[in-house]
Amino acid sequence: MFKKPFQTKPQSSLKQSSCRRLGQESQEKFPLAWELAEQRSSLKNGKAAEGTFSVAAGSPGETPMPGKLQTAKFISYIGDKGEIVYNESGEPLWLRAEVPGSNGVALIPTVYTQWRFTDILPVVWTSALAVERLIGGADLMTAGLVVPEGGMPDLEKGNLVAVCCLGNLAAQAIGTLAIDTKDIHHVAGAKGKAVLIAHTYRDHLWESGSKEMLPEIALTGRKGIPTCSEVTTDEGSCPSSSISESVGDAGAKPDMLNKTRAKDDSLASSILPTEMDLLMMTALKQVMTTVLDERNATDLLPMNSSTLYSGYLVPNGPQGFEIDVKKSTYKKLSKFLKASEKHGLVKLKDICGDTHVKAFNWGHADLTQYQPYKVCQETKSKRQSELQSLKQQQDGSDSNGSNMGKVKVTELLRPSQALAPLFDDAGAQSQSGYFTRHQARGVLEEYIKGRSLVVANNPRMVKLDHRLCDGLLSKDEYAKLSTLPRDKLQARLQEKMTLYTQLLIPGRPPTVKIGRPPVVDIICEKKMGNKVTTRVVGLETYAIDPVAIAKELRITCASSTTTDPVPGKKGTYAVIVQGYQVNAVSKLLEKHGLPEELLQLTDKSGKAKAKKVAAGR
């Protein structure tokens, strides 16, 4: 009834006479709750209460129906109408509505009331797995009941009941029975609905109150309550117990995860969200211990959160368990990573709107006590091959290393002769001799940290030793500067290093060239009279056929096109198309894999300025 938002009218205070009538009605229908309230009051005052327990005598929270109440009429998302009874603080305590399975309008306690007076309704038991379905809006099926050793209590169809999870008397849901329970002794193979749910913990009615979390209410002194040892299922074990126990002990005994799963592979779909949370945290510790350790992960940071999840967490989960963030309570990867950061395992950084892992805390106390488990090699190899294929598609390369996708440009830096001693002292090594900008920053940071060059009272400033002076200062600055800000040092380092560009061109092996990448010129110019032509030069550099481009432009622009040799450049042709066709040419070249930064526009026609003036009018 309340699994989706409902409409309510403003709350209004009830008269004392109406409050008394509601109190009398609740006493008649739920006497056990009032007896419990009276016992609590007697214990509190040190003497037994005499006579009828007064509604107005108890303060809110001490009686099922407080002396001062407020009501509001509501309409549910399916059109059911009724009335909600609130206490003074706005907590929904009761419902007056016609619910499925009841005869007419019924007075129904909410979970808030049941949590305070657990005897108010008879209890039917279910497993933690079924509870998740109830909160999602489903009714409780007969097969989802948990039957105590002595059988179910004698309840009739239409009776109000509280649905509780094993081990806790706090109601997860309130509903009406759809069947008589006296003849139920086992549920194996049973079909049909057992309880028609009216209201659940975490539904929108619960959200309209204080949003109190589900309390843990002990089972002491209660008879007829099933325990895990009394419950029998087709597997002969307590529902979800093997998974819960194994996941709960994952930090101490990781091998139990694999052993438990080997016993019953049918539990793959029955992992609870809280159990998936533990599995994901265990997988993160496994990855930090065995794959992304301090020796191997430094060059990969910062790492995109999607790469961490798909490339490392999923393939390194316990054997037989499938890591799926959507099946956890987090639902989103960013929330899981924030929880991990709060726990102290990782540090996050937002880069261009995406969450990245900035650093791993390999010194965390959890990792020092962690014992890695064995990962299924078949699953890991399959996932690694998928990732390799995906990476090749993103990089635009096939299995032989030749590029089949878009042109990819990577800036690389090489230490100059003056900077070479600094990199050698820092122990920075690269097989190719080139460094990315991020790696170059890391080398300087390691050098500063290793030689304790940070100014003690100002961490932003760095002391200049002979290596930094030789590599980053001019001759005039030698005698003038003894310290420099860290950011200026980083800027000077990258200015002093030689810039190279790595090009991944479709159909060709990767190449590295000094300086910035060559551009494709798009030139608009006037010819005879007032005619404008668009000329494209430099396509051969990126293995694009000028003749094919001319043919496509002829169709796209509905204009005449031609190819002419470029004077002074042997084997180079210019594509010439009639008219101002900058947009069409740019889109076509991007379609052929050229990123926008490789296109250089030169407008000699004045058409662009004329269009801007016209648009301004």
Image (cartoon, rainbow, N blue to C red):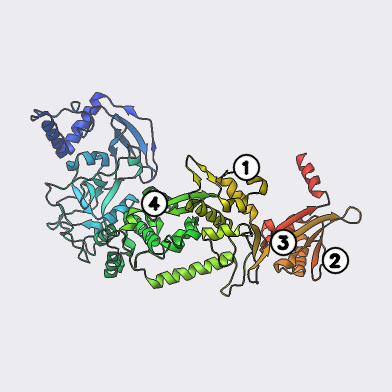
Instruction: Identify the amino acid type marked 3.
Output: Pro
Circle count: 4
Reading the image, the residue beneath label 3 is 518
Instruction: Identify the amino acid type marked 2.
Output: Pro
C-alpha distance separating marks 3 and 4: 44 Å
> Callout 3: helix, strand or loop?
loop
* Disc marking residue 480: 1
C-alpha distance separating marks 1 and 3: 40 Å
Residue located at (27% from left, 44% from top) = 214
The mark lying in front, picked from 3 and 4, is 3
Q: Earlier in the sequence, mark 1 or mark 2?
A: 1
Reading the image, the residue beneath label 2 is 567
* Disc marking residue 340: 4
Can you name the residue that lies furthest to the front here? 479
Q: Decide: is 51 above or below 394.
A: above
Can you name the residue that lies furthest to the top here? 16
Q: Are marks 1 and 2 in contact (CB under 8 Å)?
A: no
